[in-house]
Image (cartoon, helix red, strand yellow):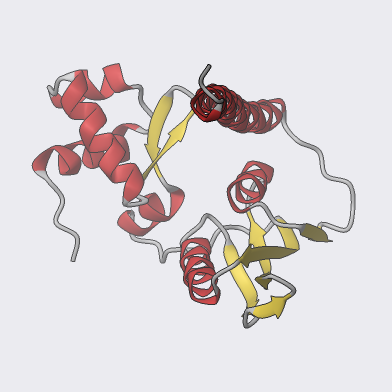
Amino acid sequence: MIDFSDNEKNIAKYLLDNGPKTVQDIGKGTSLGATDVMKAVKKLIQLRVVERDGENYKLIDAVTTGVKGAPPKEFQQKYRVRMTIEGISESKGALQKEMDVLVDKLKKARCNIHELSQSEPVLQENHYSTYVETVLSTSTFKDLINLIINYGPTAVEVLEPTKNVELSLNEAHEVINEVVSAVHYYITIIVNLSKQAQNLQRTIEAQKVLLDQYKAPKQ
């Protein structure tokens, strides 16, 4: 059983009674400092009790519904997709381990999994390859985009809805920000790796010059 701290309990109760609130509001309502609030909120997010909603934090719907006495419900199905996630590695054991971890994380993600299959790693030329295929559903387009960003599938087939879907302005704004954040994150990684590669190349060239000078016949 999860052992919640007093701060985490107080914040969860405050959000249950008052709905989504900012860090400042939570601090005032619970008489906690901003540092204590953020520490507790981060832990509650990790435990899938609280989620961020713009500048606010709120209890996830399943928690709110369960606490208020109604039976917990699955995420409302709105977007149903078939997703294929592939993996490759030179090590069969490492590949199998990584894909097992991926499957465990996927089962805890904000989605309903209807089907899931995992293939055995197969040797292809100089590496092993495998894939996970799943049929899952999410209640929001934002959750679907988050899954795609976080798990990098090689193929996504939309099964439902079969008709056009309209996004609210708020949901469109959330999705765009999620994509922008992900693109910025990966661009930062690429730029840093590029700088490291350039520095490494300069180091190799400098060492080559020194080595050539050392090997050159002395006059």
Residue 156 image offset from top left, x and y in percent: 78, 58
**Quarter of the rendering occupied by the N terminus:** bottom left
Q: Considering depth in this image, is 90 or 178 the residue closer to the camera?
A: 90
Apparent side of residue 138 relative to residue 62 in the rendered image (left or right): right
Residue 49 image offset from top left, x and y in percent: 34, 49
Q: Considering depth in this image, is 216 or 91 the residue closer to the camera?
A: 216
Q: Considering depth in this image, is 195 or 210 the residue closer to the camera?
A: 210
Q: In the picture shown, does residue 213 fall above or below 148?
A: above
Which image quadrant is residue 76 in? bottom right
Residue displayed at 79% across by 59% down: 155
Q: In the picture shown, does residue 219 fall above or below 90?
A: above
Apparent side of residue 151 relative to residue 50 in the rendered image (left or right): right
Residue 217 image offset from top left, x and y in percent: 55, 25
Apparent side of residue 19 relative to residue 117 in the rendered image (left or right): left
Residue displayed at 53% across by 62% down: 106
Residue 5 image offset from top left, x and y in percent: 12, 45
